Amino acid sequence: MIARIRGNSKIEGEITVGGAKNSALPVLASLVLISEEIKIEKIPDIADVSEMISMIRSAGVAVNFEKNTVLARPSNLKGEIREFGSSIRASILLLGPLAVRTGHAELRYPGGCSIGKRSIDIHIEGLKKLGISVNEKNDMIEAIFDKVLKDVRIDLRFPSVGATEHLMMTSVLLNGIHTEIRNCAKEPEIVDLGKFLNSMGAKISGVGTDRISIDGVKKLNASVHSIIGDRIETGTYIIGALSSGGMLKINGISNNVMHNVTNELKKIGAKITASENALIVYPSNLRPFKLSTGPYPQFPTDLQPQMTLLACHVNGHSEITETVFENRFRHVDELKKMGADISVDKNKIEVMPSKLHGAKLVGNDLRETATILFAAATADGPSEIEKFEIIFRGYENIYKKLKDIGIDFEILKIDREVS
Ligand code: EPZ
């Protein structure tokens, strides 16, 4: 799919963000643990969610998904899922829970954005401690659950978001076993997952800290949950508006999950106000900045490409260091096609003020595609973005939202081979 973006747009207006992709995916994966009917609201209608729903249906969970609401109930659970899952990273989260419930799980190797090595060694090491042996066979991964006789302690070598969620979910139904996970990730999406599991009767404490304890229970009960707002979608729109000098109101998000981002932006001069469930961004004179990404509450790596765009629009030299993923600067090549002045040195980039012009661009991963979309919207002259369809993996109702904030675009159906 090719999108043509008009350019010279001022991004302003009002939108409502969806539920968080990175909370909805682990929450949906945890539905292989249920024994009674579950209702989950604010599930974003995006491609990654459809893939995860196909996976849990294939594992035997009956799922009805309408109007951002999932109704799910257990039926004949099976551990093997061969036809789905290789396009999303979160598919790995099913491995441990399915192995505990069925004794044997087999999945396609997890996919997702190619922004680094993305190995799963921390997941596997933790599963082993929970009595699960893992075999990697070509593009399949198999897990066999033995039994756990005594309490377990797992020290994560890095506060991995996925490994924290995966091992927490896998421990929930280890009846009578006390599991302690240390050096955990603390992202708001992990807190949301913990809240959902506890609402079904799980016994989890310490979520949101670097030490999580789980006391295994026999079964989980019926429950209703609503997914938190998507802070990365919100951050993308905030930074888009700031880079065009527009005013934008964003509904459906609490500053409780955004403060590490809004504080960083306010530090460089951004005018942002917060109310209970909304944020407003005002035209602001921004100063150059030095930024480093890292595990929460440090600055999120999923907003690093967008901040690179913003650095092009501030008066002075900015510096950005990426510490989470090894290969997350592909947006730099695309921004350079638009005239950006950026130098790369290993995991650090230096950005000089740059007047961007329209160009022919390519979407390579989700956050990079969102970044070049907003770069194109504010650049001088039109741009074309090939592989634009990547954006549907993580941005809900994108057509309507772009229209609502004054971005003029059209979808060209022809998909030319990328030279
Ligand atoms: C989650 O990915 C998010 N995805 C990512 O968002 C996000 O960038 C990332 O956390 C960091 O915040 C979802 O929640 C679905 P990690 P995840 O395990 O779980 C290394 C987006 O755009 N590592 O915290 O895969 C890994 O290679 C996506 O929405 C190992 O080496 O992230 C990476 O360098 C992109 N071995 C670092 O840790 C392991 O076993 C962080 O990965 C696990 C991770």
Image (spheres, rainbow, N blue to C red):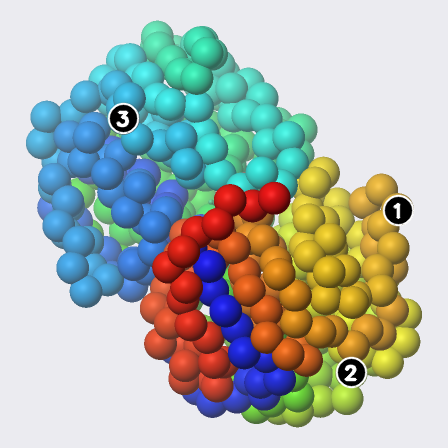
Q: Is the N terminus in the top left, top right, bottom left or bottom right quadrant?
A: bottom left
Q: Is residue 88 above or below residue 1?
A: above
Q: Which residue shows up at 78% across the image and 67% down it?
A: 339
Residue positioned most to the left:
75
Q: Is the C terminus in the top left, top right, bottom left or bottom right quadrant?
A: top right
Closer to the camera: disc 2 or disc 1?
1
Q: Which residue shows up at 21% across the image and 28% down it?
A: 59
The residue tagged 2 is: 286
User: What is the distance, in whole Å, between disc 3 and disc 1 at their CAs?
Assistant: 40 Å
Q: Amino acid at mark 3?
A: Glu
Q: Earlier in the sequence, mark 3 or mark 1?
A: 3
Q: Earlier in the sequence, mark 3 or mark 2?
A: 3
The residue tagged 3 is: 83
Q: Say few, some or many: other residues with alpha carbon within 10 Å of mark 2 (under 14 / 14 to 19 / 20 or more).
A: many
The residue tagged 1 is: 345
Q: Is residue 143 above or below residue 300?
A: above
Q: Say few, some or many: other residues with alpha carbon within 10 Å of mark 3 (under 14 / 14 to 19 / 20 or more).
A: few
User: What is the distance, in whole Å, between disc 3 and disc 2 at their CAs?
Assistant: 48 Å
Q: Which residue shows up at 64% across the image and 79% down it?
A: 381
User: What is the distance, in whole Å, between disc 2 and disc 1 at their CAs?
Assistant: 24 Å
Marks 2/1 in contact by CB < 8 Å: the verdict is no
Q: Which residue shows up at 23% across the image and 56% down it?
A: 40
Residue at disc 1, secondary structure: strand
Q: Is residue 141 above or below residue 383?
A: above
Residue at disc 2, secondary structure: loop
* The quarter of the displayed image where residue 85 is located: top left
x and y, in percent, of residue 208 in the image? 53, 51
Q: Please tell me which residue lies in front, 33 or 41.
A: 41
* The quarter of the displayed image where residue 78 is located: top left
